[in-house]
Amino acid sequence: MSEKQKVKVLVVDDEPDIIEILSYNLQKEGYEVASAEDGIKGVKLAAKFQPDVILLDIMMPHQDGVETCRQIREIPELKNTFIIFLTARSEEYSEVAAFDVGADDYITKPIKPRALMSRIAALFRRESKKEQELTQIKIKDLTIDRTSYTIDKSGKTIILPKKEFELLYFLAKNPNMVFSRDELLQNIWGVDVFVLARTVDVHIRKVREKIGDDYITTVKGVGYKFELN
């Protein structure tokens, strides 16, 4: 419990009842909780509160959750903050949009507090496991640094969003090995998170746009690999 007491959670939702229920259950588990009722206030409070986890609704007045997430991901101090979308919308485009701007998980309403606590705990377990891995990989003309989430390419620093970085890091530490979309989803997003396979394609495309097309190869009908040759 002493470890959980250090964890800060920000709840951003326009429904007071949901804020009240989530805040109660989170505080009961020992988390420090703050809340905001719309996206604009959520961004301002996130910058000040610097939470470890953000529970973020999609449909909100003034500014929706997707735009709010995008703005939060631009705050350097929050690059490692977990963002979990809570939404009544289950359409595919909403889910893709959520992961596209840097979400770590996506949960549809009605929310079951106990299940939510388990999902939060699972995120921290995966992060703890990743911290035990190599902190730096040097491959081809890239230096991939897990401590700063940066890539050095021939003296130029490239900063990737968290999930894009983790995808590149995973492929680079297993060069010339082909991974299917399902394998990448399980290793990057985890078995506890249901993510569409298309999300992998979107992240691969974005990584290529930033570091170039000479590193990650598409193996037609199978998946992707980091090309060492």
Image (spheres, rainbow, N blue to C red):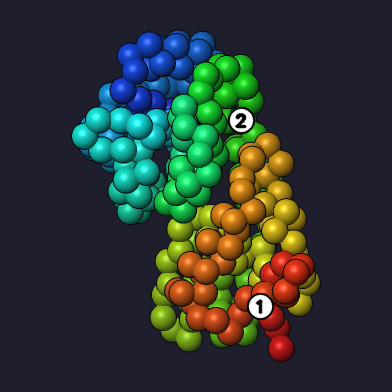
Q: Is residue 60 left or right of residue 4?
A: left
What residue is shown with label 1?
217
Q: Is residue 163 left or right of residue 161?
A: right
Residue 109 badge: none
Q: Residue at x 64, y 25 (%)?
A: 118
What residue is shown with label 2?
119
Q: Is residue 16 visible?
A: yes
The residue lying toward the viewer, choosing from 127 and 211, is: 211
Element marked by disc 2: helix
Q: Amino acid at mark 1?
A: Thr
Q: Position of residue 203 (x, y in %)?
A: 53, 61
Q: Residue at x 42, y 22 (%)?
A: 32
Alpha carbons under labels 2 and 1: distance apart: 32 Å
Q: Quadrant of the N terminus?
A: top right
The residue lying toward the viewer, choosing from 50 and 114, is: 114
- Above or below residue 211? Residue 67 is above
Choose top left, top right, bottom left or bottom right for residue 121. Answer: top right
Q: Label 1 crowding class (10 Å Cα cut-off): few <14, some 14-19, many 20+?
A: some
- Above or below residue 66? Residue 217 is below
Q: Position of residue 202 (x, y in %)?
A: 53, 61
Q: Residue at x 47, y 32 (%)?
A: 89
Q: Residue at x 66, y 63 (%)?
A: 170
The number of numbered discs placed on residues in the rendered structure image is 2
Choose top left, top right, bottom left or bottom right for residue 126. Answer: top right
Q: Position of residue 142 (x, y in %)?
A: 56, 79
Q: Position of residue 79 (x, y in %)?
A: 42, 50
Q: Is residue 187 visible?
A: no
Disc 2 or 1, which lies upstream in sequence? 2
Q: Amino acid at mark 2?
A: Arg
